[in-house]
Every structure is written in structure tokens, then in C-alpha cells.
Amino acid sequence: MSRWKEFNREPVAGEWTRKQKRGYHRVRSLLWFWECHQFQVLWVTLSTAEGGNADKLTYRHKQLRQRIERQLGYEGLEYYQVRTEEGHGVLHIFSAWRVPDGERPRRFWISQEWLSAQWEALHGAPIVWIKAYKAGNRSRNRLSRYVISQYVQDQSGYVNMC
């Protein structure tokens, strides 16, 4: 089976553990919920610099979310994160936001430059990655499968999801 077909097929019973299947469906259901409720979703990766404290990742992510809400005006930000110990510690995050009722429509976007500067100020690591999520069944299935297969399945560095 080609690598493309193998990557894009649904997991077959017995291939993934119960924990992995639960994680897959959790990610997929959350993306579906956000799509149905007109949330815009960004896929963000935040790293830890060499010598940095990976134990502070979750707390610093909270501080970053607060800055995004206050400084960029994206109040009511929701998220899903997977924490791994790859490199010196990494957070793989889906951030979701929707335009509040009664407000003018606008795009949810955070520039990589701004995000990098904020993350370096908070956590000492300028390396960040950001990409907009394209809504749709195919994207939802592929991204859910990717998150579990890359960050959870057979990863000794996997820490948790929340």
C-alpha cells in the first residue's frame, strides 16, 4: 500500500491502542464541533529552547493565551494541546476563536513574527510554527490521524493531551 493511501485511511481495529483511538476521536470531534459553531482554527507549535524549562510550557502557554486575548482582541479563545518531550519540549496546539455575536466578521490570525516575539519573551524560545486549519471532513480526518500518529503513537516523548 502506498504511503499516501496508508496515511489517509481510517485506523483499523487492532492497529491503535484504546488510548490512541480515544485521542483520535477526541481531536476529530473537537474540530467538528468548532467547524459547526463557526470557529476559526489555527494549528500552532511552540518549542522550548535548549536549556529551557519544559515543565513551564503549559503555564507559559496560558500566559500567551492571555496576551492573545488582551492584545489582539481574540477573547474567548479555546484550545486543545498535545505536549511532547521531543527536542527540549514542544506543545502542539489547536487554537480556536469565533467572532462574538453582534461583532463585525474578521479573520482569526496571529502573525508568526508577533507570536515568535511573545513566545521568546515568555519562554525564551523564538521557534514557533503557525498554520490556518482548513475546515472540512477530509482535513478533519487527516489532521486528527496525523496528531495521533505523529505525537502519540510510538512516541516515547509523549507527555499528555488536554
Image: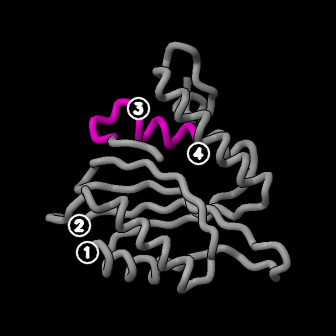
Identity, as a three-letter code, of the amino acid under mark 2 = Ala
Q: Which residue carries the number 4 mark?
A: 143
Q: Residue at x 50, y 43 (%)?
A: 147
Q: Which of the two discs, 4 and 3, labels the residue nearer the N terminus?
A: 4
58 up-or-down from 26: above or below: below
Identity, as a three-letter code, of the amino acid under mark 3 = Gln
Q: Nearer the viewer, mark 4 or mark 1?
A: 1
Q: Nearer the viewer, mark 1 or mark 3?
A: 1
Q: Quadrant of residue 69?
A: bottom right
Which SS class for mark 2? loop
* Magenta stretch in the rendered image: 144-158
Which SS class for mark 1? loop
Q: Which residue carries the number 1 mark?
A: 124
Task: Check residue 49 in the rendering and tell me which mark sits there, or answer none.
Answer: 2
State the CA–CA distance, disc 2 to disc 3: 24 Å
148 with respect to 127 (left or right): right
Q: Which of the two discs, 1 and 3, labels the residue nearer the N terminus?
A: 1
Given residues 68 and 114, the one toward you in this image is 68
Q: Which of the two discs, 2 and 3, labels the residue nearer the N terminus?
A: 2
